[in-house]
Image (cartoon, helix red, strand yellow):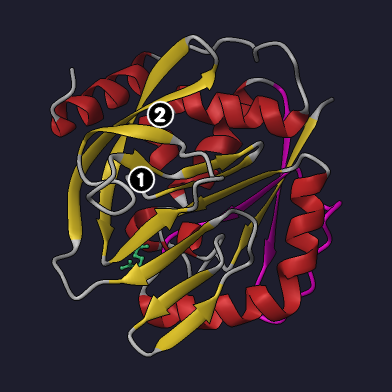
Amino acid sequence: MPELRVCALYPELMNIYADRGNLLLLQRRCEWRGISFTLLRSDLGDELDPEAADLFYIGGGQDRDQRLCALDLAEVKRDALHAAADRGAVVLAVCGGYQLLGHSYQLGDEQLPGVGLVDLHTVRSDGPRLIGNVAIEVELEPGRPRVLAGFENHGGRTHLASSATPLGRVLRGHGNNGEDGLEGVRRGTVIGTYLHGPLLPKNAWFADWLMAAALGLTGPLDPLDDELEDAAHREARRAAGVS
Ligand code: GLN
């Protein structure tokens, strides 16, 4: 039986807006397909085994919790996360977790380190928080644009270096910084995004893409009865103003 092994990093500290729901959705969609699902966790101070999981997950968090995690990521888990990404494991990070995938998160006079998996940096702004429903267009498969819909709430502004590829283009909402029309980042199987909601229950098609990538499948997963999931997706799009 195929198995999906997921490792949640800091599942208590980095779980704003019920981002844990993303893990539940992965679990259910595995079970419904007869794919065995294992959930591991890695907390402050825990060494990370890059071989132990197919998908590493970091949710969103408050600045003060991010501070603890940023230091731990940089000191304890950095090399393992790079090794995991290099061997094709999926790394999915949402909002506060996303901000820590880059080079740094500047909070006033303080600079939190990032893991440097993607070429970007984030600066906490004195300006208004970027809040609201958001929809972005992504093209994970060339020639097949699709919509991700969710909710964002962040004070940090993320700036991609010219070498970095965004996850998508903002259709509605603010995205990385409210200025350049870009949202998230993608480097192969490393994905960062500001979309909460949680992200995956509102975008089951994206969960399936992540699962297939994590399992190393080339073809699509078995289809499921997605009537409710499709309704959730439509509603999230509608809330963002993209029908
Ligand atoms: N603390 C970060 C910010 O405000 C991330 C918040 C979040 O994860 N929603 O920018």
Q: What type is the residue that disc 2 sits on? A: Asn
Helix, strand or loop under label 1: loop
Question: Which label sits in the foreground, 2 or 1?
Answer: 1
- Residue 113 appears in which quarter of the rendering? bottom right
Q: Nearer the viewer, residue 14 or 125?
A: 125
- Residue 197 appears in which quarter of the rendering? top left
Image position, residue 157 (x, y; %):
32, 61
Q: Residue at x 19, y 76 (%)?
A: 126
Q: Compared with residue 228, is residue 46 higher up or lower down, i.e. above or below?
A: below
Q: Which residue is mark 2?
A: 203
Residue at disc 2, CB closer than 8 Å to ligand 1:
no
Q: Determine if the magenta segment contains residue 139.
A: no
Instruction: Tell me the quarter of the image containing the N terminus.
Output: top right
Q: Residue at x 40, y 33 (%)?
A: 168
Q: Determine if the magenta segment contains residue 58.
A: yes
- Magenta highlight range: 34-60
Q: Residue at x 46, y 36 (%)?
A: 167
Image position, residue 60 (x, y; %):
42, 61
Is residue 103 shown left or right of residue 229?
A: right
Q: Are marks 2 and 1 in contact (CB under 8 Å)?
A: yes
Looking at the image, is mark 2 or mark 1 earlier in the sequence?
A: 1
Q: Mark 2 to mark 1: distance in Å?
A: 10 Å
Q: Compared with residue 4, is residue 113 higher up or lower down, i.e. above or below?
A: below
Q: Quadrant of ligand 1?
A: bottom left
Q: Which residue is mark 1?
A: 195
